[in-house]
Image (spheres, rainbow, N blue to C red):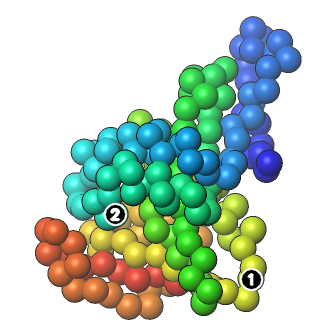
C-alpha cells in the first residue's frame, strides 16, 4: 500500500501515535457507493458534463476492475472517507481511464495528481494511458497536460450539451 508524504501537523494533540498519512489504495467493490456520491457531487458542481451517466450498480461493476482511491484519515478531517477516485481498464493495447473525480469540497489539494502519478508509476511502461475530457473542462485539461498527456484526437458533439470530447494519450 503506497502512501503519500504525511502533512506537517502543528497541533500537538494530533501527535498521539495516530497515522495521519493520507492513503492511496486499490479500489474495492465496497467503495462503489462512496464513488457514486463523489460523482453526484462533482456533476452538480461542474459547469460542463463529466463522464458517463452510470448508475451506482454500473459503478460497482467497474470497481471490480482496477483503480485507485485516495482516502483521508479521520484525524485529518476526512472521516476516513474517499477524497478522489480513478478507475481504469486494461484494453490490452493501453490503460484506459474510464472515470475519475475528486470530491468538489476537496479539489485543489493534489489528490487527483497523486492518483494519476500512482497509475503512471504502477502501469507497464510499454502501453499508453488513454482518457477523454470535455473540451471546456479547463481545470482537468490543465492537470492532464501538466502530467504529460497530449491531445491525440477529438469527438465532436460527444457530450449531451453538444460539447467536444478531447482524447488524451500518455506514453
Tell me residue 117's x, y (percent): 67, 63
Query: Callout 1: helix, strand or loop?
Result: loop
Q: Quadrant of residue 74?
A: top right
Residue at x 81%, y 15% (from the top left corner):
15
**Other-residue count near label 1 (Cα within 10 Å), few / some / many at <14 / 14–19 / ≥20:** few
Across and down, in percent, residue 75 comes to 66, 20
The image quadrant that residue 50 belongs to is bottom left
* Marking on residue 159: none
User: Could you tell me residue 40's position as x and y percent?
Assistant: 31, 44
Which residue is at 74% across, 82% downward?
125
Name the residue beneath numbered marker 1. 125
Label 2 CA crowd tier, 10 Å (few <14, some 14–19, many 20+): some
Give the CA separation, mark 2 to mark 1: 26 Å
Q: Is residue 56 visible?
A: yes
Residue 52 location (% of width, % of height): 32, 64
Task: Say whether residue 53 is left or right of residue 35.
Answer: left
The quadrant where residue 67 appears: bottom right
Q: Nearer the viewer, residue 8 or 118?
A: 118
Q: Residue at x 74, y 28 (%)?
A: 20
Going by the picture, which residue comes out furthest to the top? Answer: 13
User: Could you tell whether 84 is left or right of 26 in the image?
Assistant: left
Q: Of label 2 and label 1, which has the lower sequence position?
A: 2
For disc 2, the marked residue is 51
Indicate the secondary structure of the residue bearing disc 2: loop
Q: Is residue 135 left or right of residue 152?
A: left
Query: Where 67 falls versus 12 (above or below)?
Result: below
Amino acid at each position: 500500500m503506497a502512501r503519500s508524504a504525511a502533512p506537517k501537523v502543528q497541533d500537538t494533540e494530533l501527535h498521539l501515535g495516530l497515522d495521519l498519512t493520507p492513503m492511496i489504495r486499490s479500489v474495492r467493490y465496497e467503495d462503489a457507493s462512496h464513488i457514486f456520491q463523489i460523482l453526484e457531487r462533482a456533476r452538480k458542481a461542474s459547469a460542463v458534463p463529466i463522464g458517463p451517466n452510470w448508475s451506482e450498480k454500473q459503478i460497482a461493476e467497474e470497481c471490480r476492475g482496477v483503480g485507485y482511491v485516495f482516502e483521508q484519515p479521520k484525524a485529518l478531517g476526512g472521516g476516513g472517507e474517499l477524497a478522489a477516485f480513478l478507475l481504469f481498464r486494461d484494453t490490452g493495447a493501453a490503460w484506459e481511464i474510464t472515470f475519475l473525480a475528486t470530491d468538489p469540497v476537496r479539489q485543489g489539494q493534489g489528490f487527483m495528481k497523486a492518483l494519476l502519478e500512482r497509475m503512471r508509476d504502477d502501469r507497464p511502461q510499454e502501453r499508453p494511458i488513454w482518457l477523454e475530457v470535455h473540451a471546456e473542462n479547463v481545470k482537468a485539461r490543465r492537470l492532464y497536460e501538466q502530467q504529460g498527456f497530449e491531445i491525440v484526437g477529438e469527438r465532436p458533439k460527444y457530450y449531451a450539451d453538444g460539447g467536444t470530447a478531447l482524447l488524451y494519450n500518455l506514453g
